[in-house]
Image (cartoon, rainbow, N blue to C red):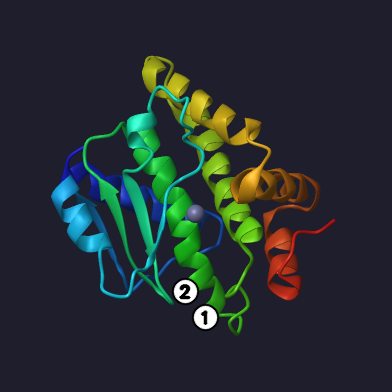
Amino acid sequence: MDPEDFSRIYLEVKEFYKSLDMDIEEQISIKLVDKFEMEKETKTPDEPMIERPATIGDDDKIVETRKEYYLVRNVKITGVFVLYGYPRMLTQKTLVHEMMHVWLKFGGSSSSSLGYLDLQGEVEEGICEVMAHMWLSSEIKSLPSRRQYEIRLGEYLKYRIESKKTGDYGRGFQKGNAAVMKYGLKWTLDYIRMTKSFPP
Ligand SMILES: [Zn+2]
């Protein structure tokens, strides 16, 4: 993936959210970086929390990527840095997850009086995983069959999300996905905003 492709997939991710009526007007830097820049960008004096996508496990064939995608989540998000050189499906899925954090912190919150700030880990990571999973499903459907490699990687990444049952990501996804299946995305988001939890 080169920087030009990265801008394109970033725009696609914004379009994906826009199609769900969730505009992201971020004020942060979203960058494709190399390992050196990644270290520089994610090391700040006040030690921001750095996130690794938990859908990539230690037993994974693509385990090398697990440390490579970071979201810097200080008191507010300061940037999203994606490491250069990974497959498009993985990079884009990760971006969809990270941009949901951005939406919760900026887009979703600004229009509705801080409603999504201070969510617990399970709720926040869970709904971000739901979005990544939703994007993978729609992307797989839209790809022509000749793009077998991407389709199969997408199926695999989906399976990874679905099969995880523990931790903030796993439990959060199971609850969030069940809620979205039952009540739809918009209703589930409204419920989260009002109660800071998933519907039962
Ligand atoms: Zn996350």
Name the quadrant of the C terminus. Answer: bottom right
Could you say which is closer to the camera, residue 73 or residue 22? 73
Q: Which residue is the extreme one toward the bottom?
A: 113
Q: How many marks?
A: 2
Could you say which is closer to the camera, residue 109 or residue 22? 109
Please name the residue shown 74% across and 48% down the image: 175
- Is residue 132 left or right of 7 when viewed as pictured? right
Please name the residue shown 43% across and 26% down the image: 143
Crowd rating for badge 1 (residues with CA inside 10 Å; few <14, some 14–19, many 20+): few
Residue identified by numbered label 1: 110
Q: Position of residue 55 (x, y in %)?
A: 51, 38
- Is residue 34 left or right of 29 when viewed as pictured? left
Figure quadrant of residue 2: top left
Figure quadrant of residue 181: top right
Please name the residue shown 81% across and 59% down the image: 199
Q: Secondary structure at mark 1?
A: helix
User: Residue 106, can we see it?
Assistant: yes
Q: Which mark is residue 178?
A: none
Q: Which residue is the extreme one toward the left?
A: 36
The relative height of residue 77 versus residue 90 in the rendered view (above or below) is below
Q: Position of residue 156 (x, y in %)?
A: 51, 24
Q: Secondary structure at mark 2?
A: loop
The relative height of residue 37 versus residue 136 in the rendered view (above or below) is below
Under mark 1, the amino acid is Ser
Q: Position of residue 136 (x, y in %)?
A: 51, 36
The relative height of residue 182 versus residue 79 in the rendered view (above or below) is above
The relative height of residue 153 versus residue 54 in the rendered view (above or below) is above
Crowd rating for badge 2 (residues with CA inside 10 Å; few <14, some 14–19, many 20+): many
Could you say which is closer to the camera, residue 170 or residue 13? 170
Residue identified by numbered label 2: 106
